[in-house]
Amino acid sequence: MRYPQIPPEYLDFLQRFVKLKTPDETTWFNSTQDFNGDTLTSEFAWNEFELLSLEALAGDTPSQSMIRDFWNAHLPIVLSVRHSYAYFAIGVADHN
């Protein structure tokens, strides 16, 4: 499991909705379906910003390793494309 230390309060919160988004659909919470890959209608994966960063740095192994380390320590819970790409994440590493 990638995130073994997810706060139980957040896991409880995930059970309270299927979709939670702004009316213009530019900002949304990742849902259980997103994390499980069950959302076929979303254009963004739950880890889209990680994937985009890895793609942008293709061939740069040290930088890609730093990106993976960052996202292994941060669980993205909200994604936004309203004005530019933005996210909220929960720090799930031991030092958090």
Image (cartoon, helix red, strand yellow):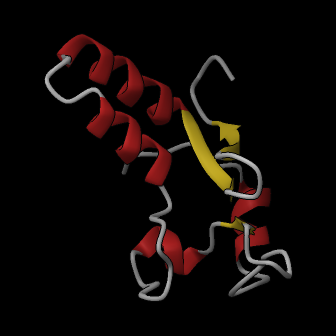
Which is nearer the eye, 81 or 66? 81
- Which x, y percent locates residue 41? 48, 88
Quadrant of the image occupied by residue 54: top left
Judge from the rendering whether residue 87 lies leftward or rightward of residue 59; answer left or right: right
The outermost residue toward the front is 83
Query: What percent of the width, then of the height, locates residue 47?
Result: 46, 53
Residue 33 % position (x, y): 52, 80
Which residue: 76% across, 50% down? 83
Q: Nearer the viewer, residue 50 or 38?
A: 50
**Nearer to me, 1 or 59:** 59
Provide residue 3's location: percent of width, then percent of height: 48, 46
Of the pair 84 and 93, the residue shown nearer to us: 84
Q: Is residue 31 above or below residue 80?
A: below
Height in image: 4 above or below 16?
above
Which residue corresponds to the image point at 19% horizontal and 30% vertical from the top-left? Answer: 58
Which residue is rendered at x = 45% and y = 54% of the image?
A: 48
Position of 44 with respect to 94 (left or right) is: left
User: How many numbered discs?
Assistant: 0
Q: Quadrant of residue 12?
A: bottom right
Compared to residue 1, the image places residue 61 above or below, namely: above
